[in-house]
Image (tube, grey):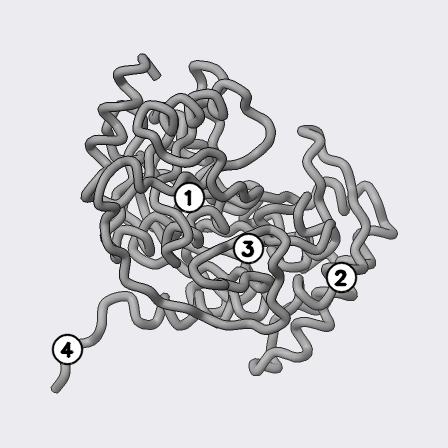
């Protein structure tokens, strides 16, 4: 009798969920309208519908598992027209699913599904994280975005699935402007950079001037090119590392308190670590996925190939980052 593969069922469910949500979001990318949130980031009807769809898949297979998701249903409950639009998208995606018994009969049921993740807190047990559309601003422009699901148990990432429906890799180059028309998966081995001057920095071009300046100084110090690859979505930035389109990602918080969301990292780091990557905070500590919805017990982020991670961290410390 063969030994069961650890987490095989969880991985299968996560892959099916992410595939369904990626198809939904890709289909409606050019038609959704923007809605404002308290933090001024864009939220779309597809964002809510995809979270409901992801939750439905996971809850169908693992009804007792906790979920931490980005959105809750408060906006939809206060805007009936938007709620109906989300419901229609969700029902259309559900009806095309292989499992006809989706267990959701009403708009209220869908809103409750969204709230499972929107009100989830994570912690030290077993829970799923999900980001239904990571990179919503780029999504609205028809550029790169990701759908991501991770499973954390006892503070450890054990399953990670990322879909980047628009991603096309051309000679190792990943760009916001290069958009694929198909869904697919690419796997690649990752050699370490020969020297720090060969570093290819993956960064976000907006929102954090201190972090951007730290990246510029790091590149100048090691004589690496800057800017490197600029991507809005955090999971697409991880995908760039995973696919060899870059080999270092650093996040320097704008203030002492780090408000980085757990769903922007859980699962993706597992995939990169399987290919030789290493992720810590700026103090060299592993990220604490038991802290709740935010990585508030860590300061910043350093993600790089394990062959150069320590040297990158040392260079950052030399600049008192």
In which quadrant will I find the C terminus? top left
**248 or 59, which is in the foreground?**
248
Q: In the visual, does 72 lie left or right of 17?
A: right
**54 or 34, which is in the foreground?**
34
Residue 204 picture location, percent across and down? 53, 36
* Residue projecting furthest to the right: 81
Circle 4 is placed at which residue position?
Answer: 3
Q: Number of callouts in the render?
A: 4
Residue 299 picture location, percent across and down? 36, 23
Q: Give the mark nearer the N terminus: 3 vs 2.
A: 2
Mark 4 crowd level (few <14, some 14–19, many ≥20, 10 Å Cα): few
The CA span between labels 4 and 1 is 30 Å
Which quarter of the picture shows residue 132? bottom right
* Residue projecting furthest to the bottom: 1
**179 or 84, which is in the foreground?**
179
Q: Give the mark nearer the N terminus: 3 vs 4.
A: 4
The CA span between labels 3 and 4 is 33 Å
Q: Give the mark nearer the N terminus: 1 vs 3.
A: 3
Circle 3 is placed at which residue position?
Answer: 146
The CA span between labels 2 and 1 is 28 Å
In which quadrant will I find the N terminus? bottom left
Q: Give the mark nearer the N terminus: 2 vs 1.
A: 2
């Amino acid at each position: 009798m063969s030994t069961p593969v650890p987490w095989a069922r969880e991985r299968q469910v996560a892959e099916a969920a992410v595939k369904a949500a990626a198809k939904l979001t890709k289909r409606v990318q050019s038609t959704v309208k923007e809605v404002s949130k308290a933090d001024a980031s864009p939220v779309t009807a597809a964002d809510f519908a995809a979270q409901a769809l992801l939750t439905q898949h996971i809850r169908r297979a693992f009804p007792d598992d906790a979920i931490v998701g980005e959105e809750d249903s408060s906006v939809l409950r206060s805007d009936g027209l938007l709620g109906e639009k989300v419901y229609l998208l969700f029902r259309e995606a559900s009806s095309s699913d292989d499992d006809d018994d989706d267990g959701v009969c009403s708009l209220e049921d869908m809103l409750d599904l969204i709230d499972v993740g929107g009100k989830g807190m994570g912690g030290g047990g077993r829970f799923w994280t999900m980001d239904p559309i990571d990179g919503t601003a780029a999504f609205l422009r028809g550029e790169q975005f990701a759908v991501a699901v991770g499973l954390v148990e006892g503070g450890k990432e054990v399953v990670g699935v990322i879909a980047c429906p628009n991603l096309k890799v051309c000679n190792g180059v990943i760009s916001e402007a290069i958009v694929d028309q198909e869904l697919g998966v690419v796997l690649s081995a990752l050699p370490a950079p020969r020297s720090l001057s060969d570093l290819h920095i993956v960064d976000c071009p907006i929102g954090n001037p201190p972090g951007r300046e730290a990246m510029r100084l790091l590149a100048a110090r090691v004589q690496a090119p800057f800017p490197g690859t600029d991507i809005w979505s955090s999971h697409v930035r991880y995908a760039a590392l995973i696919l060899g389109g870059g080999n270092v990602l650093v996040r320097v918080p704008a203030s002492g308190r780090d408000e980085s969301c757990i769903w922007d990292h859980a699962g993706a780091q597992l995939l990169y670590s399987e290919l030789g990557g290493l992720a810590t905070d700026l103090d060299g500590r592993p990220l604490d996925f038991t802290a709740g919805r935010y990585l508030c017990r860590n300061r910043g982020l350093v993600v790089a190939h394990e062959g150069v991670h320590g040297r990158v961290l040392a260079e950052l410390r030399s600049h008192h980052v």
